[in-house]
Amino acid sequence: MTLRRALAVRWAALLAAAALLLAGALAQAQGLAPIPALDSPVVDVTGTLDPSARQRLEAQALALQQRKGSQLQVLVVPSTQPEDIAQYAVRAFEQWKLGRKGVDDGVLLVVAKDDRRVRIEVGYGLEGAVPDAIAARVIQEYLVPRFRAGDYAGGIEEATAALVKLIDGEPLPAPMADHAARERRGGGDWLVALVVALIVAQVARGLFARAPSLLRGAVGAGAAGGVAWLLSSLLLVGALGAAIGFFLGLATLPAGRYARDRGWGGYGGWGGGWGSGGFGGGGGGFGGGGWGGGGGMSGGGGASGSW
């Protein structure tokens, strides 16, 4: 056999071996239990939970997300075989990307009903609130007794309520909805601050009508700028208020106008005008914009159990 032919045979053997390994890997991957689509805080492909239980669990998860930003997910499947439930939970967690990106504050409760196995998988950002030992206690104290009695809904509700309580005690970044609401309120605050500053500047101008214009401007700037800053907590808005007060103070006041308007009485039309329609909205949920992961990752922590 020539050297060239020997090399060709060797390469063919290596390629055949690689093909067999690849085929085996593909076969194993195709044999893994599927991860369902994430479309709700409660994904139950077994039909174990009745509609009322699902509704309570969904409401609890949505309230937690709006309040803390964390994502609590329940997954009920028949089996995770051939994987162990811990491996399956990590795979589901990573595929769904539970929790917020960079915060990693997701928690996944997996129930493999036919395997009689349960797993609590915890995101990295919540490992302080739900350490492995606590996750194991939640399983043993809430899930196992209820599951043995056939009360799956009761066990899941009690366990998730315990997890919510633990998460509520953990300091976490505020939800994006809170930031957005604060920004909307802040936008209204600076506008209100400038309008009030204008009123204060007008009053100061009237009170110091006989004073030199520079003094009126200085008083108006101090009063209007101070009020604008106090109402908005923004230096820029305070500076704008001061500018309004200063230039309004420099302007000439027509003789007798302040007396005719009787001071504050001349501005009586402002009452009741500030009741805005509120700033509704906030956190999303799955009813309108869909329920999905936020880019979080599993920390590998948690606990598994059997019943």
Image (cartoon, rainbow, N blue to C red):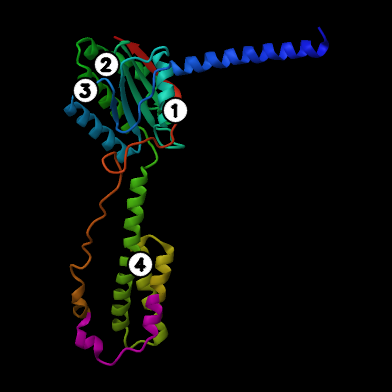
Does the magenta portion include 170?
Answer: no
Mark before the other along the chain sequence, 1 or 2: 1
Q: Which residue is mark 4?
A: 228
Q: Which residue is mark 2?
A: 143
In the foreground, 245 or 79: 79
Separation of disc 3 and disc 2 at Cα?
Answer: 14 Å
Using the image, determine if residue 230 lies above or below residue 203: above
- Helix, strand or loop at disc 3? loop
Does the magenta portion include 259?
Answer: yes
Quarter residue 237 falls in: bottom left
Tag in front: 4 or 3? 3
Separation of disc 4 and disc 3 at Cα?
Answer: 55 Å
Q: Which residues are magenta?
A: 244-263
Residue at horizontal 38 percent and vertical 36 percent from the top? 171
- Mark 1: few, some, or many residues within 10 Å (few <14, many ≥20)? some
Separation of disc 3 and disc 1 at Cα?
Answer: 25 Å
From the top left corner, tell me how far across and down residue 239 is, in percent: 43, 69
Separation of disc 4 and disc 1 at Cα?
Answer: 48 Å
Q: Which residue is mark 1?
A: 94
Q: Which residue is mark 3?
A: 49
